[in-house]
Amino acid sequence: MAKNFSNLSSSASDLLTRSLQVVVVEDDDLSLDIITRWLRRRGYSDLRGLTDGAAGLQACLQAPPDLLILDHRLPGPSGLAIAQHLRSCVPRERRPWTVLFTAACNTTIMHLMGTGHFDDLLRKPCIGEDYIGMITRARAGMRERRLAADSMARHRSHITLA
C-alpha cells in the first residue's frame, strides 16, 4: 500500500525518501568499519567515518549531517563534548540527529540520554536489527523536528501578516 505524504512539507517528506548524510565518529577501527560498511551496503553513500573528536566536530560544523553517530570516549573532544557544542551553536532544526554509540550503559550514560544532548542510544555490540531500529527512529525524529520547525515558521508568518 502506497503511503500518502501530501500533507507533509517538502522538507519533511524529503527525509522519508532520500539518503541521509551520515557522520560516524568512532575511534575503534573495527567498530567504525562495521557500522560504515553496514550503512554503505544499504545505500547510505553520503557517509564520513572519522576516528577522532576534533575531526568529527570540524566535519559537523562545516556541513551538519542529518545523522551523527558518536562514540562516547574519543581522542580529542568526547562524544558528549561534540554534542554539547553542536547543541549550543546549531539551531535545533538544523542540528543532526545525534546517536550515542557506546558499549557502556551505566547511570552516567543514562543521565546523558536525559540531558537532551543525544537523541538515541546505540549499544555495542550491534546487530543489523539495531542499526535498522536506529535509522527508523532517526528518520522519524528528524521528520518530527522538521514538521515542528515548519509549523513554527507558518505560525510566525501568520503573526507577521496579522
Image: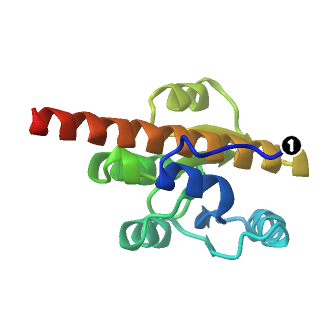
Q: Residue at x 58, y 67 (%)?
A: 21
In the shown orientation, is residue 147 left or right of residue 72? left
Q: Residue at x 39, y 54 (%)?
A: 94
Q: How is the image coloured?
A: rainbow
Q: How many tags in the picture?
A: 1
Nearest the eye: 156 or 76: 156
Q: Residue at x 41, y 36 (%)?
A: 148
SS assignment at label 1: loop
Q: Residue at x 52, y 49 (%)?
A: 12
Q: Which residue carries the number 1 mark?
A: 1
* Rendered-image quadrant of the C terminus: top left
Q: Quadrant of residue 49?
A: bottom right
Q: Is 77 placed above or below 152 here?
A: below
Q: Position of residue 65 (x, y in %)?
A: 50, 64
On the question of residue 69 being in view, the answer is: no
Q: Position of residue 24 (x, y in %)?
A: 62, 64
Q: Position of residue 7 (x, y in %)?
A: 54, 40
On the question of residue 111 being in view, the answer is: yes
Q: Is 160 placed above or below 48 here?
A: above
Q: Is 90 placed above or below 22 here?
A: above
In the shown orientation, is residue 21 left or right of residue 88? right
Which amino acid type corresponds to the residue marked 1 in the rendered image? Met
Pointer 1 local density, CA inside 10 Å: few below 14, some 14–19, many at least 20: few
Q: Position of residue 103 (x, y in %)?
A: 74, 43
* Rendered-image quadrant of the N terminus: top right
Nearest the eye: 24 or 111: 24
